[in-house]
């Protein structure tokens, strides 16, 4: 079967629709993390912005972070790829052309630094997962004892995202290429400020770091963003479907829901794409949007993923057909999260929750509970612990949030479904957490395991919180995920 490429694009477009002319585009954005989400979100919005304005200077140079696999896949097809949008009403195919170059960060460092130092580039965006920021557990600051961070600071590599970014900014400064906006699009609480702090922390490790940090302070902004589109990992079945539909093999296709949202802090010191023409919202303060999304959508996602994984349920859509799971997700969103949120003019949280849960039900998306449940120690902070703290301060009982944390701990420590099947959930702090738990399985493990995961001691000293997690942890062992969810939903 022929491979999707520029030569057969006209033919493929007969089935997928026309789009921007790739040969007219020039690079204006460097993107770190060429994963599925970027390809289905920022790359699409940026292409739409160019289509709306007629501008051609915002093509993307995507930089892989951990090896050349995605680069090779995309280069093998002239950086073209398909975004498949699917829900119960149907399927649509679109060949995206806005990514015009893919570089492998680890082996093509010089080319990456040159791109960041190019005056035509005024925006760097990132989707590199929570893990890649190398934050000290339980804090929002760079882990300055991390061996990768230390090696980058010592002038090796660079191998970390922050090290690579700062090396690029240094090259840009030397080239006199002017100001830059660095836009994190990861699901982190206050992603812009967190990245700015990590960059500052990294500069503090460098011999000439003070001067560089001062330049960054004056010339580089870190707008915060809220990003939203559910984009599961692509399966071989998805690729076969694209091949059958378009008549060309696409090794980099992504499948997403039709819904797409992007809220961006309007803090750009130089030019940027007219993303607002592609439906993005440019605002002064992203925080209310970010908090609402992380605490509602992502928190419910995590709760359903942990409970579903324990119950042996494969996908998020399937968890939504378990009545107890939907009910406990609603309890979390309506009773525990809603009272903690700042208001947004014209926004109604109840309607938002209905939309989120409807999106989760999308039967055409095979978003696995295992994928969403991964990396829990990095996700419980932004998704759940903020709600827990605020709820306790407001005398709301954060029972469903505590259930999510208890269920996550059981996924990590017990590694068995309620039916006794083996359960594999990726957890970067696995070793630390298991060590903290000291091999125990009863409720006594909760406090040391959460402390080892970086949960704030002050919160662990709050008996109202700890007793809830311990109680649910016991209940999950005794009655299983469904029954425990049912009783929490009924509280
Ligand atoms: N997929 C979604 O539904 C979705 C929606 C909103 C936001 N996001 C954000 O986008 C991120 C990426 O999601 P995705 O679906 O593209 O995942 P993916 O697995 O397809 O891609 C992950 C990307 O992050 C990079 N990466 C992973 N671990 C890294 C590390 N330790 N150091 C450096 N780089 C690393 C990879 O190289 C890859 O480019 C998520 O973690 C989340 O913050 C995803
Ligand atoms: O991508 P992660 O691993 O941070 O989180 C998994 C999902 O909760 C997340 O990707 C959602 O699908 C997304 O945030 C929806 O916009």
Image: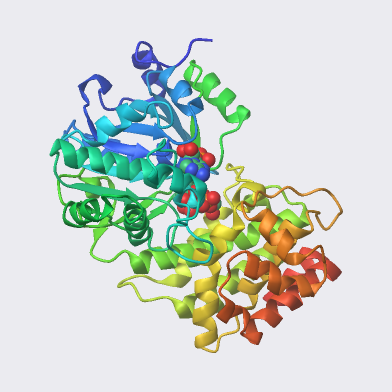
Q: Residue 164 sits in which quadrant?
A: top left
Front-most of 453 and 241?
A: 453
Q: Does 140 appear above or below 428?
A: below
Residue nearest the viewer, comparing 263 with 448: 448
The scheme the figure's colours follow is rainbow
> Which quadrant is the N terminus positioned in?
top right
Residue closer to the observer: 82 or 27: 27
Residue 249 in the image: x percent, y percent? Answer: 51, 17
Residue 415, given in percent of the width and then of the height, sits at 78, 54
Numbered circles on residues, count: 0
Quarter of the image containing the C terminus?
Answer: bottom right
Residue at left 57%, top 54%? 360
154 relative to 281 in the view: left or right = right
Identity of the residue furthest to the bottom in this view: 395
The residue depicted at 50 percent of the width and 51 percent of the height is 146
Residue 357 seen: no
Q: Is residue 9 above or below residue 311?
A: above
Residue 457, visible in the rendered structure: yes
Drawn side of residue 231 relative to residue 235, left or right: left
Q: Position of residue 293 (x, y in %)?
A: 44, 63
Q: Residue furthest front?
A: 207
**Residue at image location 47% in from the left, 14% down from the top:** 3
Residue 197 screen position, x and y as percent: 34, 60
Side of 312 relative to 390 (left or right): right
Rendered image quadrant of residue 258: top left
């Amino acid at each position: 079967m022929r491979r999707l490429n520029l030569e057969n694009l006209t033919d493929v477009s007969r089935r997928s629709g026309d789009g921007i002319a790739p040969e007219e585009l020039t690079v204006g954005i460097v993107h770190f993390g060429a994963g599925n989400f970027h390809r289905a979100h920022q790359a699409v919005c940026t292409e739409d912005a160019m289509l709306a304005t007629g501008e051609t200077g915002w093509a993307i140079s995507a930089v892989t972070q951990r090896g050349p696999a995605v680069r090779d896949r995309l280069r093998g097809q002239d950086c073209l790829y398909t975004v498949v949008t699917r829900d119960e009403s149907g399927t649509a195919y679109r060949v995206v052309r806005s990514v015009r170059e893919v570089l492998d960060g680890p082996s093509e460092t010089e080319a990456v630094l040159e791109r960041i130092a190019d005056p035509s580039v005024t925006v760097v965006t990132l989707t590199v997962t929570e893990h890649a920021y190398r934050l000290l557990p339980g804090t929002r600051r760079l882990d300055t004892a991390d061996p990768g961070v230390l090696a980058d600071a010592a002038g090796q590599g660079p191998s970390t995202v922050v090290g690579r970014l700062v090396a690029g900014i240094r090259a840009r400064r030397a080239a006199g290429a002017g100001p830059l906006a660095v836009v994190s699009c990861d699901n982190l609480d206050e992603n812009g400020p967190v990245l700015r702090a990590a960059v500052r922390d990294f500069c503090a490790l460098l011999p000439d770091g003070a001067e560089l940090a001062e330049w960054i302070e004056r010339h580089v902004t870190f707008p915060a963003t809220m990003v939203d589109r559910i984009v599961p990992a692509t399966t071989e079945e998805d690729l076969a479907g694209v091949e059958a539909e378009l008549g060309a093999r696409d090794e980099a296709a992504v499948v997403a829901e039709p819904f797409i949202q992007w809220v961006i802090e309007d803090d750009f010191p130089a030019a940027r794409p007219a993303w607002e023409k592609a439906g993005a919202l440019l605002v002064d303060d992203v925080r209310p949007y970010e908090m609402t999304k992380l605490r509602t959508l992502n928190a419910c996602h995590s709760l359903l993923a942990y409970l579903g994984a324990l119950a042996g349920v494969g996908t998020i859509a399937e968890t939504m057909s378990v009545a107890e799971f939907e009910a406990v997700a609603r309890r979390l969103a309506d009773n525990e999260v809603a009272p903690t949120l700042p208001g947004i003019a014209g926004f109604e949280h109840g309607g938002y929750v209905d939309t989120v849960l409807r999106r989760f039900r999308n039967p055409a998306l095979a978003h696995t509970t295992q994928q969403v449940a991964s990396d829990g120690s990095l996700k419980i902070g932004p998704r759940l612990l903020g709600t827990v703290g605020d709820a306790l301060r407001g005398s709301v009982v954060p029972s469903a949030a505590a259930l999510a944390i208890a269920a996550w701990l059981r996924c990590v420590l017990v590694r068995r479904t309620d039916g006794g099947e083996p359960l594999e959930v990726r957890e970067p702090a696995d070793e630390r957490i298991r060590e903290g738990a000291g091999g125990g399985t009863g409720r006594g493990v909760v406090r040391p395991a959460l402390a080892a995961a970086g949960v704030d001691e002050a919160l662990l000293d709050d008996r109202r919180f700890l007793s809830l997690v311990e109680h649910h942890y016991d209940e999950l062992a005794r009655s299983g995920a469904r029954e425990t969810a049912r009783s929490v939903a009924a509280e």
